[in-house]
Amino acid sequence: MEGASLTVGNASLRINYGLSKWNDVVLTVTGVTALEPLSITSIDTASGNVDLEWVGGVPFYVVEKKSSLTNGTWTAVSALSRDMSASLPADTTNGFYRVTGGN
């Protein structure tokens, strides 16, 4: 419908129709809401796994790990997911975890 508004993710859009003979649909961005930064809110090992929860960011998320902060390589330890939590098998090595979004 001409002039209707909709929201997709963090963007507000307005629908209009172009003036060409091809019936063009024009989506105009009318506003963008700032996204909450991605932040790990919980990490727990009580279940025998490494359980992580986070907020913010943009899907798809991946949990990454590395054994040392001086080692420059992060390794993905989860599949791409829209979920804002992950439960990973605990191993015997020390590790540092991060979550990346927008993958």
Image (cartoon, grey):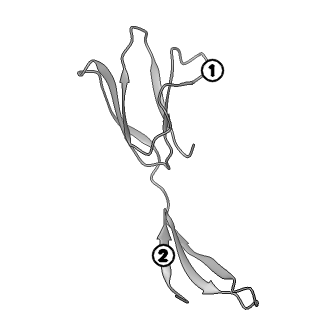
| Helix, strand or loop status at disc 1 | loop
Return the x and y of residue 91 as percentages of the image width and height: 39, 12
Name the amino acid type tagged 2. Leu
Residue 65 to residue 13: above or below: above
The circle on residue 90 is none
Task: Judge left or right: residue 103 versus residue 83.
Answer: right
Residue 91 shown left or right of residue 10 in the figure: left
Task: Give the x, y percent position of residue 72.
Answer: 63, 20
Please report the residue visible at 39 percent of the width from the left and 8 percent of the height from the top: 92
Q: 78 or 72: which is nearer to us?
A: 78
Query: Height in image: 63 above or below 83?
Result: above
Return the x and y of residue 20 as percentages of the image width and height.
Answer: 76, 89
Q: Where is residue 41 in the image (x, y as percent from the top left)?
A: 34, 38
- Give the residue pinned by disc 1: 72
Q: Along the horizontal axis of the image, is 47 left or right of 87?
A: left
Q: Residues within 10 Å of mark 1 (few under 14, many from 20)?
A: few
Q: Name the residue under label 2.
A: 6
Q: Nearer the viewer, mark 2 or mark 1?
A: 2
